Image (tube, rainbow, N blue to C red):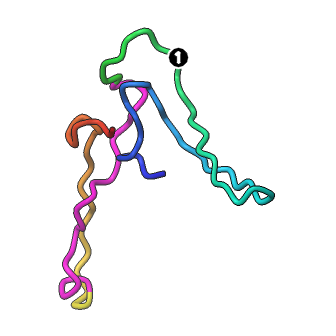
Amino acid sequence: MPKHGLDVSACEVFRFYKLVTLKGLIEPISMIVPRRSETYQEDIYPMTPGIEPALTPDEWLSGMNRDKGWEGKEVRGGGQ
């Protein structure tokens, strides 16, 4: 699961998907940091690459190189 899909109000830091082959199911498994507050916790969500591309296809084909922008989850509204 990409970071922008995590539930920050539950302090979810990672989400795995378990394949249950006998039943044909995909079971989500969340990794949650136990915290009392349901607000955004800046210390457990580091800066991450933004979702906007750094270059257009034409710029990339011409050989340009540019660093991708970094943002925190609070910029996108914090997931779910």
Which residue occupies 22% across, 37% down?
77
- Highlighted magenta segment, given as a residue range: 42-60
Which element is circle 1 on? loop
Residue most extreme to the right: 22
On the picture, is 80 further left or further right than 54?
right
Residue most extreme to the front: 23
Q: Is residue 78 above or below residue 59?
A: above
Which residue occupies 43% across, 28% down?
44
The image quarter containing residue 75 is top left
On the picture, is 6 further left or further right than 34?
left
Which residue occupies 53% across, 17% down?
34
The stretch drawn in magenta includes residue 47:
yes
Q: Nearer the viewer, residue 64 or 23?
A: 23
Circle 1 residues within 10 Å: few <14, some 14–19, many ≥20? few
On the picture, is 42 further left or further right than 24?
left
Numbered label tally: 1
Give the image location of residue 20, x and y in percent. Answer: 74, 54
The stretch drawn in magenta includes residue 76:
no
**Amino acid type of disc 1?**
Pro
Q: Would you name the residue on which mark 1 appears? A: 34
Give the image location of residue 49, x and y in percent. Answer: 32, 53
Q: Nearer the viewer, residue 61 or 11?
A: 11
Q: Is residue 47 above or below residue 63?
A: above
Q: Is residue 46 above or below residue 26?
A: above
Give the image location of residue 39, x and y in percent. Answer: 31, 19
Which residue occupies 70% across, 55% down?
19
The quarter of the image holding the C terminus is: top left
Give the image location of residue 32, x and y in percent. Answer: 53, 27
